Amino acid sequence: MDNKEKQSFWEKLRGPGHPEIQGANAARLRPLAGEDYVGPGFIMMIRLAVAAALIVLTTLLTLSDAVVLGILIASAAVSGYDLVLNAVDDIKARCYLRESLLVAAAAVIAFCSDWPLEGALAPLILQLTLLLRDYVQSGMKHSLAAAMDPSVSSGWDGVEIVSGASLTVGPNMSFPADCVVSSGEAYADFSFLTGDPALRSIGPGSFTPAGCKCADGTVTVQAISEPDEAICTKFANAIRAGAEEPTETERKWSRLTKPLVPAALTLCAILLIALPLSGAELLSTTFHRVAAILVVASPASVLLTMPSIYYAGAAAARKKGAAIMGAQPLEKLSDTRAVVFAKSGTLTERTDTVAAIRTDKMDPATFLKVAAHAEAQSRTETAQAIVAAYGGEIDLSLVQNFRELNGSVVVTVDGIPILLGSEKFLRQAGIDIPDGSYAPAAVHMTVSGIYAGRIELSEAVSHDAVETVHALSRCGVERVAMVTGDGRGPSSRIASELAIDEYYAECSPAEQGKKITDMKSRLAPNSTLAFVGSPESPDEAFHAADVGIEIGALALGNGLRPADVFILGETTEPIVPVLDVAKRTKRFVSFSVIGAVCVKLALIVLAAAGIAPLWFTLVVDACVSNGLVVNALSLVSDKKAAEEK
């Protein structure tokens, strides 16, 4: 038998629930059950049934003490042999906090101190507790799974979906994969991603993520991903993976509860010495109290409530239209004291408007008409703004030789060569641009190689930005700033409209990252700085912040940016609700841990006083820890959140 076979046999012998001492789960006292948990194995159920039957047998039959002892030892061996194996591994790894070790020790003490029934009940109750804990955790995660990764199979049963396939989607059908609309128009429900119940109009070129539903109309789409590679699946997988990473709060409570076992052992030593010497109790009765203390001394049942609470918090944020990529950024959000916004696409609308026309070669109306015809065949937002500002009929018969180069246009309008684009583009084309023609957001035009003027563009403050900026102060945010690469004039206007006193304009990507780092250094310790950007914002800004928040993540199509939070709608509206969710989650974690620790301490006191027997302390401890996990579902309840406010 080789090493691999030996290892496989050992793993089978000790059971599938044993935690690995090393590896990714080393910080956990026990691995967590997920929504894919299928319940206890058949062998485990047989073992527990046999163990329980043996215990019942000793109460129904009149047997000698020796036979009863033998049956109860057999019952404990059947239900808890894997606990003993796990305890041996824990001792080898010098890990003395897990329940397996302490309950196994308590069972041995109970058998040795003439309390064999308690010794047989201890491993059986712990096994049932662990099964119940897995069931509760998996049930909670399964009930929240739809909010994180909804089913996309509606209307596609038996149909093989592959990337590049052409599909027809009609009313009440879901999009089975990330798709782009090829033809047709319809209204789609994006609410499971964005949190906004309003239907969206989709047409040729529209991106439709998997899981959205066609509410009205019929469209032909092309799948751009496999179903299991959809953006909603990527978000859900990232959230699940991140929820398994211990947060700083978990590490803190792990340190604070670590003395619980040594303190319990010290109390046991005092009882073993004081009670028999004082004559208050027999040594065997004292050992019974010691065993009852040991079974609740492990902090595992306390610490394992926290990951489930963070998971519920992430699901609550998803209902608000945001995907928080794990427990750590969720916790950091709860301590947000500063928020830095990028300007374009976050505080301003994504579409530009024509603010002014500067020309001394022709009247402004004619200038705008020529520019509109030149841009008529372009699909850029700038072109759409110019055509919209013109508002007249476009005669495409006047337009020839249209070419678009990196957003700039080379075209002939009514036989006249026109260049339309950025100042840099015109200078590269050899055009002499007069001094004083600089504008941070402008489209310059030449007619027959002669500079004719420029169209200045401006951005309007988004409809929700004012409310968001003002509401941040209610979430404990002390500083709101703006950083942008745009010119000082437009930036000053936007900052003034939003009452943002601190802003930095004309910053390169590297300078934006440095400004954010400088602001972060001025915050109080343990405070978080969040950067709110758009898909066009530089990576340097996201990396510099403690938490990066991406607005309009659906514009990314099938890719992910270096952000920690993705708001899937094109609005800042979810920011404040998500911060509220983060704060509620942190409060819930603190309440749960403090409450569970207080119950443990009370049980230890009752056990030390001889009031609470071993089975009672085990059952109460299990009910409290599992009850806290179930109660974490209230984080997802909008009604509960409204009551707390």
Image (spheres, helix red, strand yellow):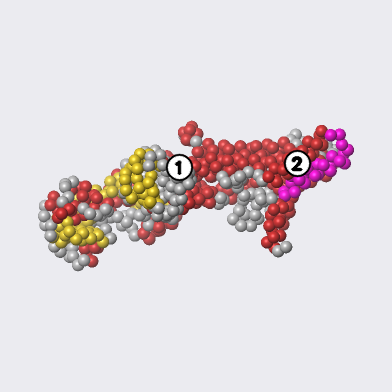
**Mark with earlier residue (2, 1):** 2
Name the residue rendered at 59%, 50% in the picture: 251
Name the residue rendered at 55%, 42% in the picture: 142
Is 81 magenta? The answer is yes
Asked if residue 402 is positioned above or below residue 97 in the image, the reply reads: below
| Circle 1: residue type | Ser
Asked if labels 1 and 2 touch by Cβ distance under 8 angstroms, the answer is no
Name the residue rendered at 38%, 44% in the picture: 169
Q: Is residue 592 visible?
A: no
Q: Can residue 304 be seen in this view?
A: yes
Q: In which quarter of the image is residue 126?
A: top right
User: What is the spatial separation of the Cα atoms under label 2 and label 1, in whole angstroms?
Assistant: 44 Å
The one nearer the camera, 181 or 390, is: 181
Could you tell whether 158 is left or right of 5 in the image?
left
Name the residue rendered at 62%, 41% in the picture: 135
Q: Name the residue under label 2.
A: 50
Dot 2: element: helix
x and y, in percent, of residue 386 in the image = 21, 51
Q: Give the range drawn in magenta.
A: 61-83
Q: Mark 1 points at which residue?
A: 154
The one nearer the camera, 132 or 432, is: 132
x and y, in percent, of residue 349 in the image = 31, 47
x and y, in percent, of residue 278 in the image = 84, 39
Is 372 magenta? The answer is no
Q: In which quarter of the image is residue 399?
A: bottom left
Could you tell whether 592 is left or right of 508 in the image?
right
